[in-house]
Amino acid sequence: MPAIISKAPGKIILFGEHAVVYGYPAIAVPIDAIQVSVSILPVIKENQSTIKIRNIGWQEDIPFAELDEHDPIRTSIENVYAHINQNPPHFEMTISSSIPIAAGLGSSAALAVAITKCMSQFLGIYLSNDEINALAYKSEEIQHGSPSGIDNSVITFDQPILFRRSKPISQIKIKSSIHVILADTGKRTFTKEVVASVKQNLEKEPDFINPILAEIGGIVEEAAKALFNGEVKKIGGLMVRNHIALRKLGVSSIELDRLVESARINGALGAKLCGGGKGGYMVAICEPTSCERVSLGLESDGATHIISTTIKGSKQGN
Ligand code: PMV
């Protein structure tokens, strides 16, 4: 039997992180330049199931039974078993990922989506995108507490989305392709902790925090229109406003602010932190002619890794 292979992209939240936890809308896009690939091969009965992890610079083979009960790989696999109420045959799963971990680029959601898809194919069961999304959300809940669900949704549906908690997901139209540069602060943070710090601040100072969340919600509404109309300069300006609001919320960092400033000085149309914040990656958008200058500037201002890619415009008629 040939190996079954499933892939899932990384993602960026273009607008609205953190406010999305409190019911405001947010916009996220899949990023194909980084992805998780999962393959499964059946093994003979006497051999136990193994997980082979083949990340850049790190390779490990772990017997499935030795994975911690809250391990994201284990929970993603077990969620599929529970859903179909069946114990699967033994298998060898190989996971390779180019999505940086704990960096705001959706590594855990992509892992959950790719494992869920691969496992369902291996077991010969059909899961709709809604079912895959719901199962991936369950794994995300174990990792992140009470995530909004934006990461697993954009990765499962693999298209730009306007996401609002507990509302149907809507696909967002992007009139023309946008060049993006993602730059790493080199710092790793846990989204769960940053989300908890915002919650604490909200409880302590609701009159200060609530207007910031509402302001972000308003920026997202404007951004959805600007993306639809292909107004890249406006999109850039809204990203900067979103970053300033996130800084007021207390989720930026010296490194993120430095990289956002660097991108703007070097000609980016806009830049902001992306994801949980306090570290991880920032995102800048630029005209094709200024991308190289922006990248070089980010490198000399401390970025430890750069990903240069494109958000594709929606196909006509979509
Ligand atoms: O850091 P990431 O990529 O998991 O993004 C988190 C986005 C938040 O809005 C901060 C949290 C959430 O659950 O939506």
Image (cartoon, rainbow, N blue to C red):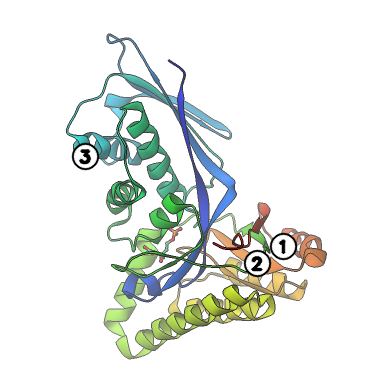
Q: Find disc 1 in the rendering and name its residue.
A: 298
Determine contact: label 3, label 2, CB under 8 Å. no
| Residue at image point 32% right, 37% down | 126
Relative vertical location of residue 127 with respect to residue 51 in this rendering, above or below: below
- Give residue 222's mark: none
Residue 83's mark?
3
**Picture layout, residue 48 above or below residue 201:** above
Residue type at mark 1 is Leu
| Sequence-earlier tag: 1 or 2 | 2
Task: Describe the element under mark 2 as helix, strand or loop.
Answer: strand
What is the spatial separation of the Cα atoms under label 3 and label 2, in whole angstroms?
40 Å
Front label number (1 vs 2)? 2
Foreground disc of the pair 3, 2: 3
The first of marks 3 and 1 along the sequence is 3
Across and down, in percent, residue 295 comes to 75, 60
Using a 10 Å C-alpha cutoff, classify the residue at mark 2 as few (fewer than 14 neighbours), some (14 to 19) or many (20 or more).
many
Q: Do the residues labelled 3 and 1 touch (CB within 8 Å)?
A: no
Q: In which quarter of the image is residue 214?
A: bottom left
Q: Mark 2 points at which residue?
A: 284
Q: Between residues 50 and 24, which one lies in front from this camera angle?
A: 24
Amino acid type indicated by mark 3: His
